[in-house]
Every structure is written in structure tokens, then in C-alpha cells.
Amino acid sequence: MKSANRFYLFNSRIATHGIFWSLYYVLFGLIWVNDKGYLASFYLEFILLPIRIFAVYTTIYFLLPRYLLKRNFVAFFTGYAITLLLGGILQRIFIHLFYEKLLLNDSSTGLFHVMSLVRAIILINTTVLFILSVKLFQLWAVENEKNKGLENEILEIRSNRRTHRIPTKNILFVEGLGNYVTYHLEDKSRITSYGSIKGALQLLPKNFRRVHKSYIVNKAHIKSYDAMTIDIQDNSIPRGKSISDEVLLN
């Protein structure tokens, strides 16, 4: 949480969002000013801002974590297209009712004028794509920072009267058998130590997942997976039925 907060002004998400949308409102109010004057331009941006906020937050707080980060691209792009279309329709309705008719007293342009609708969708899409890019960069930076921290973690394993100091990033998976656990390493070597699979998990960082009663995997080394098995290097690890994709990867 602390590493994520450093991307926000004053370490506050609310303050950052408030400042961003305030600047956005002023900037676009100035950019889109025309012969109707500043009042009309800022009034138009005021009535359209909630629609753009709705599209942005639907994308970054619903579609992004629920679909895109889980690589469900079809569901993400379907939801994204629906969000843009709904936003474009709402924006066109607001412009027609509260700007063209109410402020300008002009009904010459139809409610669902095709080019006006397309323009509305493009403008919303531009805003959403910009903020989505910023959010993805933030998530990447936080994850990269976590991974750098994990690279420096050392696990001490007692085996054959010796203590082995192993970087946790080099551990592919851990296999439990009775009162012993075997650590399978990236260089294909193994270290067997006295202990339980539960005890081993408690010593490992958060990027390790227990996927079976006898196996713990390092998710950074997962090559592929299905409902039954997880492939790591040349090894096929059994996967418990209760292990969802969320538990495995998040």
C-alpha cells in the first residue's frame, strides 16, 4: 500500500483524483472555447465531466482488475466497447438536452446525430486510454518494486548438517513428502530438509502459492497451467481442485 501511495500527490488518492479532474475541467474548458464564449464552454464541460469520470472509473476499477489483469481480453474489450458506447450515448443526450436546446436554444442537430455520437465516443475514449495507461504504468512500477525486493530475499535451508543460503527467486517449487520437504531450484538441483510443507510456506515470500497438499510453487516461474496441472520448467505440478486462478496468480 505504501509503495502505491507514493504515486499519489500528498500520498492521497482522493486528493490526486480531485486535483486531476479539476485541472482536466479547466484545461478542456479553455481548449474547447468557441464563438459562444467561455461560459458556454465551461458549462458544457461541467455537464459532460460526470460521464467521462464514469467511463474512466468503470474501466480502471472494474474492467481492468476483473478482466484485463486476468488476461480475459475478450471480456475486457467487450466491456470496454459497451462502456464507450453507453458513455457516448449519454454524452450526446446531455449535449442535446442541456446545451443545444437549453443554453443555445438550437434543435437543428438531431438527438442521435451519427457524427456527433462518434465524436463523443472518440473524446471519451481518448480520456479513458490516457488514464488507463497511467494506471497500468503504476501497477507495473509497484509490481516491479515488489519483485526487486523478492530478488534480495534469502532463505536459509538446513540440510545434511549444512545451512544452504538460497535466493528465493531461484526456487521453482517445493515438494512435501511426509516429514521432509524438497526445494527444487532453477539450476535443476534439489535440497531436501526436515520439516513440513506448511512450515515451508510460512518461511517463503508472498509470491509462493500452495497449490496442492504436497506442493508450493513460485508463481514467477509458472510457464503454463490448466485446471489439473501447473508447468514449471520441465516439471508438471498437480493442482488442487480448490485452487482458483485468483488464488494462483494474485
Image (cartoon, helix red, strand yellow):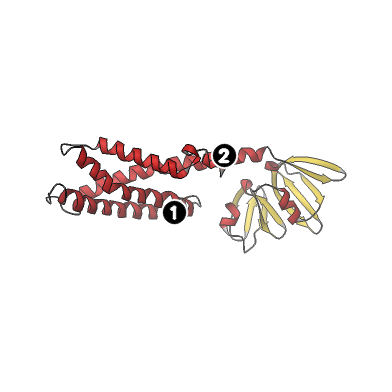
Q: Secondary structure at mark 1?
A: helix
Pointer 1 residue: 62
Distance, label 2 to label 1, CA atoms, is 23 Å
Report the side of 213 relative to 157 (left or right): left
Q: Earlier in the sequence, mark 2 or mark 1?
A: 1
Which residue is nearer to you in this view: 178 or 26?
26
Whether residue 109 sits left or right of residue 153 in the image: it is: left
- Which percent across, then down, holds residue 138? 49, 40
Q: Quadrant of residue 176?
A: bottom right
- Which residue occupies 78% across, 56% down? 196
The foreground one among 239 and 199 is 199
Q: Which residue is outermost to the right?
A: 161
| Residue 244 at x, y percent in the picture | 58, 59
Contact between labelled residues 1 and 2, with CB atoms less than 8 Å apart:
no
How many numbered dots are placed on residues in this image? 2
- The mark found on residue 144 in the picture is 2
| Spot occupied by residue 84 in the image (x, y as percentages of width and height) | 33, 51
Q: Is residue 73 visible?
A: no
Label 1 sits on what residue type? Phe
Q: Residues within 10 Å of mark 1 (few under 14, many from 20)?
A: some
